[in-house]
Image (cartoon, grey):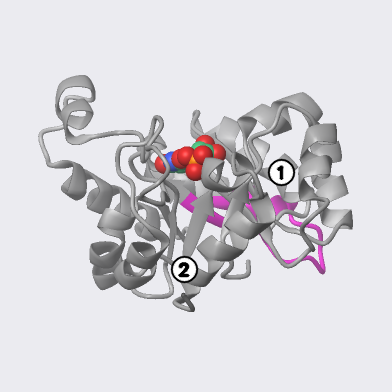
Amino acid sequence: MKTSPIIALDFESAEKTIEFLRAFNGDVNVKVGMQLYYKEGPAIIAKLKELGFDIFLDLKLHDIPNTVKSAMQSLASLGVDLVNVHAAGGKTMMESALEGLDKGTPSGMKRPSIIGVTQLTSTDERQVRDEQLIQASLRDSVLHYAKLTKEAGLDGVVCSVHEASIIQEVCGSEFLKVTPGIRLPEIGAHDQKRIATPEEARKEGSTHIVVGRAITGAKDPLAAYEHINARWKGME
Ligand SMILES: O=c1ccn([C@@H]2O[C@H](COP(=O)(O)O)[C@@H](O)[C@H]2O)c(=O)[nH]1
């Protein structure tokens, strides 16, 4: 997947999505999440591929190993570039996910990269302690999940910008650090807790940033994308 920002296409329909993308060319990366995929299914992936976009299919699988393996085998045939699972599903589940992807990738096609979600960027220290009953700090929990994800053979993690540099130190610079929760000071945090700017993401070692509402909610989404891309690439 290219290093340009990944636009989260959190739209209610294929029509709205395609209309939104009219201003963009295939050079941008896009992310299809649950809202759009559950409504439109594989057809939206086929359409986005036809338009030339690199695609992160963000379904965050989390189930027993056998189910995740079979689901990944199905997803592998879609031809997306990146998929994910919840690292909390465990090492065996993640290994099974990888097996399913390998098995389902048609010959001659590249296997999609696969990453593990550590702690959602909408999660804060209190939730880790009081709701998940994890004794470690949020940062240590994220790092633990990152190490587990690497041990399972996955290609990287979803984490916040705040944990990217320690994960780079421990898991290496090749290990993907895909970071949502990107915000500009003038835009509110919404439901996100661990937020950061595009510049912070670059400095902390994110390999990719995921940006949704800062672009999709802008008056001029293309201008917002270009502004964020320039800040991410250090050109502004
Ligand atoms: O930890 C995570 C994992 C995934 N996401 C997804 O990224 C986008 C972020 O959208 P914004 O509008 O920029 O907040 C969204 O699709 C989430 O499902 C995440 O935010 N955090």
Mark-to-mark CA distance, 1 and 2: 30 Å
The residue drawn where x is 59% and y is 39% is: 217
Q: Are marks 1 and 2 in contact (CB under 8 Å)?
A: no
Residue 75: mark in rendering: 1
Instruction: Give the number of the mark in front: 1 or 2.
Output: 2
The residue drawn where x is 26% and y is 55% is: 162
Q: How many numbered circles does the render carry?
A: 2
User: Left of 133 or right of it: where is 199?
Assistant: right
Q: Tell me the amino acid under the disc marked 2.
A: Trp
Q: Nearer the viewer, residue 199 or 223?
A: 223
Query: Which of the image's four quarters has the N terminus?
Result: bottom right
Q: Is residue 126 above or below residue 72?
A: above
> Can residue 107 be found in the magenta stretch?
yes
> Can residue 205 be found in the magenta stretch?
no
User: Left of 106 or right of it: where is 178?
Assistant: left
Q: Tell me the amino acid under the disc marked 1.
A: Leu
* Residue 224 occupies quadrant: bottom right
Q: Residue furthest top?
A: 131
Q: What residue would you read off at disc 2?
A: 232
Q: Earlier in the sequence, mark 1 or mark 2?
A: 1
Residue 89: mark in rendering: none
Q: Dot 2: what SS?
A: helix
| Residue 181, x across and y down, in percent | 41, 46
The residue drawn where x is 35% and y is 34% is: 122
Q: Which residues are magenta?
A: 98-115
Q: Nearer the viewer, residue 117 or 111?
A: 117
| Residue 30, x across and y down, in percent | 67, 52
| Residue 163, x across and y down, in percent | 27, 56
| Mark 1 burial class by Cα count in 10 Å: few <14, some 14-19, many 20+ | some
